[in-house]
């Protein structure tokens, strides 16, 4: 049993009044000095940029310029849809854009570069050093054993880095799922350029065109039928990290075992999926319908359930702040409903314009971060900077309150009158 968070700070007069423009800009920040974090950020950005240049060169060399352009044009189709889906799932407390950009870039550049080089090396080594391994057998072993391990470990590295260095933004299962999904989307994007570009080059050399071409078949399998494959594998790892983020604070062995289990499950599912391509059409269809689709549906349900639990935790962990005077009594219930949040933004936009709607968005994001901060302290014990961060979140929240508070209360009243049961039931209905 871990200690409860420290007592809530009482609100007296609150922060000094702010003009609307100041509230819209948010808290003023001092320029960050040049220190180790900046050096790490610059080094990481340089590494990703270099990896991107190298992997693009490798792909273009393997596919040709025309094949590269065709592959790029076709591979981009599922990317906006997948990213939109993950951002929709993450809209309770959106991940900072820099985290999502890093995850996508890592998957598209660094992870694919290592995977392409390691998979090629492993296949060549198997063919050269194992007497019984023909080139076809070496390719099969590389696809079903080596590739899943290398690719899932490299995609998991992005989750590890964000879990380690952006721990404050890693609040639970939803964050683990979103970061893993975005990383895998980037990986699949680059991999699809390679596969589609290579298929196009082969069609060009053999004179195949139309729906019977290898390019059309590759597009159908990778873009239409299974665009979710890579995200599905890596989400299993992200799920384990998400659970570890709020559980077992004093048991590193349990957290490590959980993360390794998630990674092993991702590798296993990836290997099964890669092996399905060698089973013929009937075997592929069986693996797709018996394993992949049920796994996708189960993880989709789990993601929605986790988001609903987060909404409920917003209500529970914000409730104590009403007694201290930081929030009005209906606000925890209003903030636990995505429908009421959206209605509050609409009310603010109609009343004071787009900037007021953005103020409501900032207010709801800060309130959610505050509830997750208190939840983590309750589940894992308060960190050393707990009180300072809580006070910072509360003061930033208070700056947006003159515009967000009335809009939320009006939205809550409207939802209550329109829905009978009101927003109190909305986490179940709207998650």
Image (cartoon, helix red, strand yellow):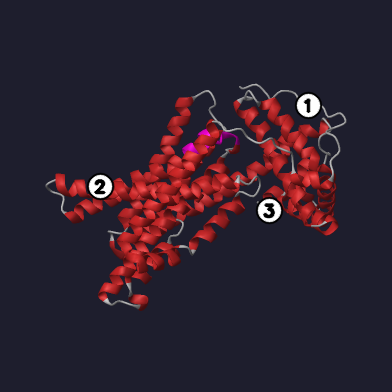
Could you tell me which secondary element the residue under label 3 belongs to?
Answer: helix
Question: Extreme right residue here?
Answer: 13
Q: Relative to residue 245, is residue 13 drawn left or right?
A: right
- The magenta segment: 159-168
**Mark 1, other Cα within 10 Å: few <14 / some 14–19 / many ≥20:** some
Residue beneath the point at 86% across and 38% down: 17
Q: Residue 386, percent across and down?
A: 67, 26
Nearer to the camera, 394 or 247? 394
Nearer to the camera, 43 or 119? 43
Tell me which label, 2 or 3, sits earlier in the chain: 2
Q: According to the image, label 2 marks what residue?
A: 121
Q: Residue 24, percent across and down?
A: 77, 47
Q: Are marks 3 and 1 in contact (CB under 8 Å)?
A: no
Q: Relative to residue 185, is residue 284 drawn left or right?
A: left
Give yes or no for residue 372 being in the magenta stretch.
no
Q: Is the residue 102 above or below the residue 221 in the image?
A: above
Q: Is the residue 49 above or below the residue 256 in the image?
A: below
Tell me which label, 2 or 1, sits earlier in the chain: 1
Nearer to the camera, 401 or 217? 401
Give yes or no for residue 166 being in the magenta stretch.
yes
Q: Relative to residue 135, is residue 276 drawn left or right?
A: right
Looking at the image, can residue 391 be seen?
yes
Q: Quadrant of residue 401?
A: top right
Nearer to the camera, 235 or 205? 205
Image disc number at residue 50: none
| Mark nearer the viewer, 2 or 3 | 2
Q: According to the image, label 3 marks what residue?
A: 430
Residue beneath the point at 52% across and 39% down: 41
Could you tell me which secondary element the residue under label 2 belongs to?
Answer: helix
Q: According to the image, label 1 marks what residue?
A: 9
Q: Quadrant of residue 390?
A: top right
């Amino acid at each position: 049993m871990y200690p409860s968070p420290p007592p809530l700070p009482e609100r007296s007069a609150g922060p000094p009044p702010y003009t609307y423009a100041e509230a819209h800009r948010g808290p003023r920040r001092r320029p960050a000095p040049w220190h180790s974090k900046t050096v790490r950020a610059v080094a990481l950005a340089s590494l990703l940029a270099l990896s991107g240049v190298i992997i693009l060169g490798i792909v273009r060399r393997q596919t040709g310029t025309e094949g590269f352009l065709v592959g790029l044009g076709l591979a981009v189709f599922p990317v906006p849809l997948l990213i939109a889906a993950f951002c929709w799932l993450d809209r309770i407390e959106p991940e900072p854009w820099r985290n999502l950009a890093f995850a996508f870039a890592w998957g598209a550049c660094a992870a694919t570069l290592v995977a392409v080089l390691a998979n090629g090396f492993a296949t060549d080594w198997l063919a050269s050093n194992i007497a019984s391994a023909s080139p076809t057998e070496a390719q099969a072993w590389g696809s079903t054993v080596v590739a899943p391990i290398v690719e899932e470990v490299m995609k998991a590295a992005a989750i590890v880095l964000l879990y380690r260095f952006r721990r404050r933004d890693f609040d639970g299962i939803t964050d683990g799922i979103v970061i893993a999904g975005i990383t895998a989307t980037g990986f699949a994007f680059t991999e699809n350029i390679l596969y589609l570009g290579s298929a196009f080059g082969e069609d060009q050399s053999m004179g195949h065109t139309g729906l019977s071409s290898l390019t059309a078949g590759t597009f159908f399998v990778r873009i239409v039928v299974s665009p979710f494959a890579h995200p599905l594998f890596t989400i299993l790892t992200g799920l384990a990290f998400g659970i570890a983020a709020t559980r077992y604070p004093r048991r590193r062995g349990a957290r490590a075992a959980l993360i390794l289990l998630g990674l092993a499950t991702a590798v296993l599912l990836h290997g099964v999926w890669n092996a399905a391509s060698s089973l013929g059409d009937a075997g592929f269809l069986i693996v797709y319908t018996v394993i992949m689709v049920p796994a996708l549906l189960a993880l989709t349900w789990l993601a929605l359930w986790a988001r609903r639990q987060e909404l409920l935790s917003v209500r529970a962990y914000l409730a104590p702040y009403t007694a201290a005077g930081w929030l009005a009594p209906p606000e925890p219930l209003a903030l636990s409903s995505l429908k009421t949040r959206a209605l509050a933004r609409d009310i603010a936009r109609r009343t004071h314009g787009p900037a007021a709607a953005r103020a409501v968005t900032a207010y709801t994001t800060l309130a959610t971060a505050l509830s997750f901060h208190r939840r983590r302290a309750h589940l894992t014990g308060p960190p050393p900077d707990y009180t300072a961060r809580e006070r910072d979140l509360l003061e930033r929240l208070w700056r947006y309150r003159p515009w967000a508070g009335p809009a939320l209360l009006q939205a809550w009243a409207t939802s209550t009158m329109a829905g009978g049961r009101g927003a109190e039931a909305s986490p179940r209905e709207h998650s």
